[in-house]
Image (cartoon, helix red, strand yellow):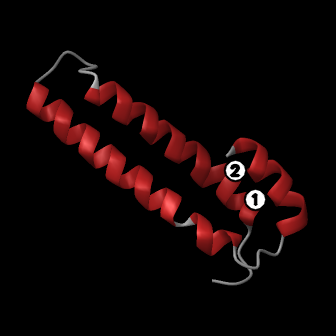
Amino acid sequence: MAGARLGFWAAELLPLARRLGARTAAAAGGGGGGDPAGAQLAALQCRALEAQLWATLPAFASWPVDGAAAFKCAASLV
């Protein structure tokens, strides 16, 4: 994908990936006090979604239209 906005990824998808990572850690640690099998399933689902969001980064970073400005911001966040 050429011409994507890296700033969009940094502003929208990165925070979402981080929230999913936090949910993964909470569910894997037994957070919520519910069913252990349900917590494991929730952790697995959150981890899969987080990985999918991170997998979009190379596409956003290839020839971004806002590369010079957004790279500084994205690099400091990652």
Query: Which residue is drawn at the image coordinates 76% and 79% (left, top)?
Result: 63
Query: CB under 8 Å between callouts 1 and 2?
Result: yes
Q: Which residue is label 2 attached to?
A: 11
Q: Which residue is at the far right?
A: 68
Query: Which residue is drawn at the image coordinates 69% and 53% (left, top)?
Result: 10
Reply above or below: 2 against 28: below
Reply above or below: 64 against 13: below
Look at label 2 and name its amino acid.
Ala
Relative to 67, is 27 on the left or the right?
left
For residue 34, the mark is: none
Instruction: Determine the secondary structure under disc 2.
Output: helix
Neighbour class for label 2 at 10 Å: few (<14), some, many (≥20)?
Answer: some
Q: Which residue is label 1 attached to?
A: 7
Neighbour class for label 1 at 10 Å: few (<14), some, many (≥20)?
Answer: many
Q: Position of residue 20 (x, y in %)?
A: 43, 41
Query: Which residue is drawn at the image coordinates 59% and 43% (left, top)?
Result: 15
In the figure, residue 28 lies in which quadrant?
top left
Query: Which residue is drawn at the image coordinates 84% and 68% (left, top)?
Result: 66
Reply above or below: 41 against 63: above
Count of all numbered marks drawn on residues in the image: 2
Relative to 6, is 28 on the left or the right?
left
Reply above or below: 56 against 40: below
Q: Position of residue 24 (x, y in %)?
A: 35, 35
Q: Position of residue 72 (x, y in %)?
A: 85, 52
Q: Position of residue 70 (x, y in %)?
A: 82, 58
Instruction: Determine the secondary structure under disc 1.
Output: helix
Quarter of the image with the N terminus is bottom right
Look at label 1 and name its amino acid.
Gly
